Image (cartoon, rainbow, N blue to C red):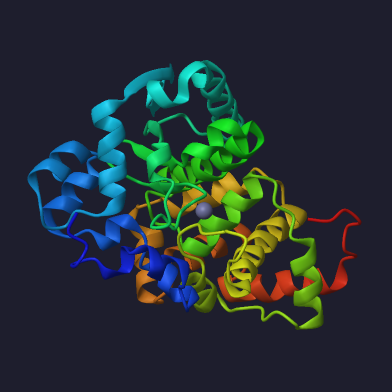
Amino acid sequence: MDSQNFPHITGSIAKNLPEAASYWEYRPSEIMRGLAQEMYLQDKVVEAYDNIAEGRDNYLQAEAFVRKEGTQIGLMQGLTLELLPKEVGTLVTPVGEVIKKACEVVAQKFDFDWNPAALVTILSSADAAEWMPSRWGYYIPKSPYGKICLPFYLVQDFEELSRTTTHEFMHHVSASLSHNRISHWLSEGLSTYAEGMQSHQARIRFRSGESKWLDPAELDGSVGIDNREEKMLSKISDSYAQANLIVHYLVAIEKEKKLTQLLLSLGDESFLPNIEDELLMRSHTDGAIRRVYGVSERLLFENALDWIRRTPIPASNS
Ligand SMILES: [Zn+2]
């Protein structure tokens, strides 16, 4: 493993990330370069790993290992599970059921037709290492399918397996319906919403001003790859919470189904809305929010904060 070209991936750095922005650099497809990246994004992970010395990274290695040693099981049309039978053992069937159920709930809620398909890969227990900042799983919009990678420990914790699968599969739905045009903050907001996150503590901090309510550009820069470990920086925690609260606000003012409309509007590549956004120098997300909710992205952020200040905090805690 030649890690010299990829100094960001060493364990010590992964453990001591100083800035929220650094998390962004961990998105595997952005770390890899050239042909390795191209093949990785087609999920030709073994070919990429075996044939391309330059541009390998730990993600590629972990995914290639499961491809080489593991097996694939069709769970349903549009959903395949990949794992190492030697490691998962007798849990293969129940793990498949938990994953299928979690994905079905999300697909139904967001009218997702399972196109493009998704592959869920359970990584090896040997790869549950410090270098992997996405200890909670990660999603990569590959082609021709989206890929969800889950850390091994989840096969021993079905509740977490279900929650994490829901979160990552929601990224797949968001990326697919929006044709990969969704901003990071909105994708994280939707994924944390889908998994059932309720940021009550963060509400209190945002109300009091203890935590800063970021503007759209700041928030987008602050949520990166999923890294919600216990020691995570409060800044990143607050960013996820803010994105989550904004989606809760959208559901408070309009039907939940409007979220699907928002995703479809983001994916609308027809001429008129796109030329309008371009001329007015709006992001796709800003344009879609205006078309579906009738307010700008910036005003949505202000209104959501206002709602948090006005609305009593629910009694339950998380
Ligand atoms: Zn996420």
Residue in view at x 38 percent, y 63 percent: 11
Which residue is drawn at the image coordinates 87% and 66% (left, top)? 311
The x and y percentages for residue 46 are 18, 37
Q: In the image, residue 232 lies at what x, y percent?
A: 58, 66
Specify whether 179 is left or right of 42. Answer: right
Image quadrant where one finds the C terminus: bottom right
The reply, left or right, for residue 63 in relation to residue 228 is left
Q: Is residue 78 above or below residue 238?
A: above
Quadrant of residue 6 in the image? bottom left
Residue 65 falls in which quadrant of the image?
A: top left
Q: Which of 77 and 41 is in front in this view?
A: 41
* In the rendered image, the vertical position of residue 180 relative to residue 220, given as above or below: above
On the question of residue 216 being in view, the answer is yes
Q: How many labels does the image show?
A: 0
Residue 303 position (above or below residue 152) = below
Q: Position of residue 40 (x, y in %)?
A: 22, 46
Residue 222 in the image: state x and y as whole percent.
Answer: 51, 72
Q: Residue at coordinates 47% horizontally, 78% vertically from top-left? A: 18
Instruction: Work out whether residue 144 can be spotted.
Output: no
Q: Quadrant of the N terminus?
A: bottom left
**Residue name at image x 63 percent, y 45 percent:** 194
Identify whether 66 is placed above or below 39: above
